[in-house]
Image (spheres, rainbow, N blue to C red):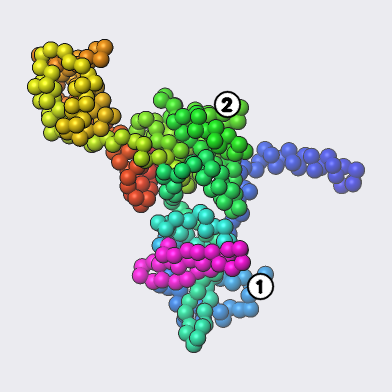
Amino acid sequence: MHRDRLEEFEQKLNEFAQNVLRPEHFIPSLQADLECRLREITIPVIEQLSRMAPFGMENPSPRLLVRDAELLDYRQMGKDGKHLKLTIRQDGSMIEAVAFGKGEVFNLLTPEARVDLVVEAAINEWNGQRKPQLFIQDISIPHLQVFDYRDARDPGTKIEELQKSLLTTSYCGAETMAVVSSRRADLLSVGHLERTSVWVYDQEQGISPGRSESDTGDAVTVKTLFVMELPESPEIWNNTLSSFGNLERVFLLHPRSSVDLLEAPSRDRFKQVYIFLRKYVGLSECDEERVIAEVMTRFGISRRMLYFILDIFVELDFIVRSEGRIEVNPTPSKRPLESARGYQALGLLAEMEQILLYEEVPQITEWITCQLQGVS
């Protein structure tokens, strides 16, 4: 080819690449020689492998694949935390593993993580003791991780801090991160995050763009989600998870202290309130605020929970609410409590809030994972 046509050749080659190459083609791959369990990586085995030395470009050190190892401890080491040291366990066998130059991965790990590793095995000799040691060539967390920052004092500032930390790794890009909240006002505090999409919960779609000029990307590309507030219903939550179908990390930053407690609905609780209403209100109208205050004091029910109960009673035609007044229906319907759509919705909402507000990270992770599998 004549050098005068090099520019044309480069242009044609780039056009061909744009049509053929997909995002997965740009992901580096690493070939492992053998998959094994930790209990199989013993000193005698490592000594046998060492007989294949000398290792180099033409004869690389054997690479072993270890799947689903429990993470017992992880920390950064070296100057500026440049390196990473893990202690992992599998089938009762425990071993230390070091990743040189991968200290930034520390920000992507949780205590509950289980890891897949591609490693090279060696023998660590110290003070007359010999034990196996692993040198990590690559690491993967093959499951969803949940990071707990609930009740963060300033969620917007915290998200900025977390994003800066994540962007130091080669595993996270700003375009794969997203922020979601129930109020557009919350999103003003993260409006400066470039290439990070922001979304608001939507009753019909699950989510809708929070900044129309910048959130036209596909939510499916999002791998890291920052949750600033919880949605109003489980349906919105499920639709949100369906939109963000490829999540790897969920950061919870929603408040807990400002949320009135919802109880899991029970027949006894509803019966208790209904009997009181019949006695207190009788067949005449009564001021709703006075009734609510009396019920809250007498039974220790939050105002939010009581509103749900009253709405369900209206749906079942047990009471009538109009212009700030409550009246008990003298001839209520015979529908069972469980048939009310509001009763069913309350149960699902109470479950969602109980888990996302008060449960620990392992339970939340398991629940969200089940939700993702259910909506995928």
Closest to the observer, 302 or 329:
302
Q: Main secondary structure of the magenta part?
A: strand
Residue 212, label in figure: 2
Q: Which residue is mark 1?
A: 56
> Whole-percent x and y of residue 201?
44, 30
Query: Who's the residue at 73% across and 38% down the image?
Result: 15
222 in the magenta segment: no
Query: Who's the residue at 14% across and 16% down the image?
Result: 328
Q: Is residue 105 left or right of residue 231?
A: right
Q: Is residue 137 left or right of residue 275?
A: right
Spatial separation of the CA atoms under disc 2 and disc 1: 53 Å
Q: Which region of the structure is painted magenta?
A: 71-99
> Whole-percent x and y of residue 8?
83, 39
Label 2 sits on what residue type?
Ser
Counting the numbered discs, the total is 2
Observer able to see residue 227: yes
> Whole-percent x and y of residue 206?
43, 29
Q: Nearer the viewer, mark 2 or mark 1?
A: 2
Q: Is residue 70 above or below residue 155?
A: below
SS for callout 2: loop
Closest to the observer, 89 or 265:
265
Observer able to see residue 137: no
Residue 205, label in figure: none
Quadrant for the C terminus, please.
Answer: top left
